[in-house]
Amino acid sequence: MPVTGRVVAQRVGWLADLVSVMADRVVVGHWADADLVRLAGGVGPDGRVLPGKGWMALRRLGWYAVAPVGVVVSDRVRRVAEEEAARALRLATSRRQVVAALLSSWPQDPSRRTDREWSVLRGLLPDGVDNATIRNRTRQIVGWLTSHGRLPADLCELETTPRVARQVSLAAADRQRVRVQRLDDRTVRVWVQLPVCPLPGSYRDWVWHALVVRLPPTVPATAAVCTPTLRPTVDGVRVDLPWQVPHVPAKLAGHTRAVGVDWGLNTLLNGTLADLNDPDSCALAAVGGPLRFDATGVSSKLVRLRRHREQLNTKVDRLTRLVDRRAPAAAPDPVSAKLGRLRVEHEAVCARIRHLNQALAWSAARWLVDHATATGATVIYLEDLTTLEARGGSRSLNRRVSGAVRGKVFTAVHHLAAKAGVAVVRVPARGTSSGCPRCGATVRHVKAPDRLVAGYRWTTCGCGLSADRDHAAAQRIAARGLANQTRTRRDPTTGGGIIRTTIDASIHPRPPRRKKTPGTASTSPPPRDRRENGPTRKQVRSATFRCSPLLPSRRQTPAPAAGSARSAVAGTSSRSASAPGQLPRMPISCRRSQTWCRPVRQRSQWPQPSIVSPVTRRPRQAGATPEPNAETVPTHSCPGTIGTDCAPVRRYGMVPANNSTSVPHRPTRDTSTTTCPGPGTGGSTSATAASRGPRITNARTVKYRPFAYAAIRGRRPAPAVAGQPSAMRR
């Protein structure tokens, strides 16, 4: 019987509630330091080693999940609950070791430990604990000490009982509870038993349901699909479907070419290419220039979004405190409505930040892996930034720096590098920017190579090093990785390599290759004379020199001469009336400030040539327009352009049948305009006074056989007789 998605989501939520209730009971019943010690020991009561699966380890210890009274569940559901409880307790055992080491070696001043106190603490801590974890747990203990006046006894007193996530890990069940069937390359069907009521009282209340899941295109067709995890959400069910492909781990040692990567704030990734020339003497050479993945634009956008998120968070906190202090009102409160809108906006900004972080991380990872494969590098040495922490600034700055995409970049790089067969190894980050990659001495950070003042962008050293700070740090990271390959260990959490202790080695730039062989004469051409104190010298090219032919010019034929036979044909036009062979240019003011609109009704017109009429401007003076002759009579005439400064619609020509509005141009003195007449049209002269205000001209050409006339400002002058000029004043 088919059911809707809402019903399926509701039933998955009922199953997740049952699992979380049973798992919480297991965690609460064994939240004690003695039980955590037993679980961390890894040995059961019978002396056998505890298995890796969580539900099997709890059952060997005798810790079982029990269903609520009156609820009937199968053994596979109890397995799922025990698996969730085992995960929560095993995470607590790792925190317990760190807290126990801190409490047993608690210093007098927790903010500043001495070298001896650090050495004692390092001896008690398990391997792989970074400085950020130590600082976070120290602050947690200091907060307890401030509020209670004493140190906590153990982790179970320092922390409350952890809550189990509201999810269903079907990996703990078998085929009696869940089945996964792959229909095709992009579709998977998951069969799972779900309850039909919140508290099932019998096995009849458990029914099989089929969930059809569409796979993304990134999942290959040969991948093996594993058992999923169901996570109920507000509007549906999230199916976390893992998949596996055959993979051979890359080797961690024996590399001769590597890419060293340093993390930056302005440039996301800074890399360099290094070669190991002699493994015995550890001779290292830097190859090429720096490799930069510059994401300044996206990083700036992320900074603005994080700042906006912090502002919204501050407003939400303030309004929340204000609403909590008020008495509940029956009518809708405007403050509560505003608080709801701010929360929705806050969620939208957070979603945008997550999306940008995801896209940025995978783009950077793809860029890095592509560079490694293109240059023939077999290993990528990354700076282990988990040992660093943003400090020394304001809280908002520390949150923005710590909230960068470091973890996502590392995850993406590990995934893509494993597919490409490139090893990924993390090296310690301490001292990579403060030491010289050539001599190992302490470097000096300045603003620029020509500004030797205190800064952070450029690195200089007494040995002659002068390079970008991130580039020098990347060289030092690559040198650490290649020189300490024998100390590389496999990281069980990521599957890559990690180097915890290193010995720094010097790396020098590779000298440029010389094409000249010893004992042969130089065949390089003489240096080019670039002196500028004389005339330009003609370059002499050899006969074998090849160059691309010049592109054909836009105009293949010259412009016809004025009064030629071609110009006498009706409907034709030349490119320019004043300069043949050149494109006419209108003033910038005409091209930018004219506004054209189409009239409501337009009468039929004779085809007009697309050309700018020759116009001559001169100061106003007495006299009449000269008589037309054969030299001054072109084959075209636009009487509608009389006294109008028109802007061309296209590059050539005007459309006098449209209205135009000109930006006011005030001349220094009165001027007059003379337009050459055409056959059957006549010429005209218009005057422009030195006055302010826009010039609005309505020009329209009316179809007439023997002659044409212009209507200006609604007035129709007498038609001009062919061959006779007409004077018109504005």
Image (tube, rainbow, N blue to C red):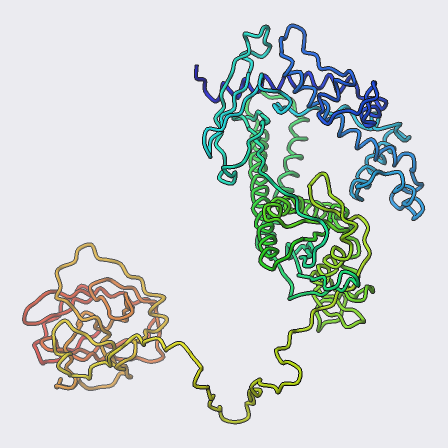
In the image, 131 versus 308, the foreground residue is 131
Left or right side of 304 for 612: left
**84, above or below 637, in the image:** above
134 left or right of 269? right
Across and down, in percent, residue 110 comes to: 88, 41
Indicate whether 375 appears above or below 317: below
Query: How many numbered circles are shown?
Result: 0
Residue drawn at the location 70% of the way across and 60% of the way down: 470
The quadrant of the picture occupied by the N terminus is top left
Q: x, y percentage for residue 103?
A: 89, 34
Q: Is residue 408 left or right of residue 159?
A: left
Residue 609 found in image quarter: bottom left
Choose between 129 and 399: the one closer to the eye. 129
Q: Which residue in the rendered view is the most extreme toward the front? A: 519
Residue 114 lies, with reference to residue 376, above or below; the image says above
Looking at the image, the residue that sits furthest to the bottom is: 534
Instruction: Residue 539: give x, y in percent of width and height.
Output: 47, 88
Q: 297 or 729, which lies in front?
A: 297
Quadrant (top left/top right/bottom left/bottom right) for the C terminus = bottom left
Q: Nearer the viewer, residue 637 or 506?
A: 506
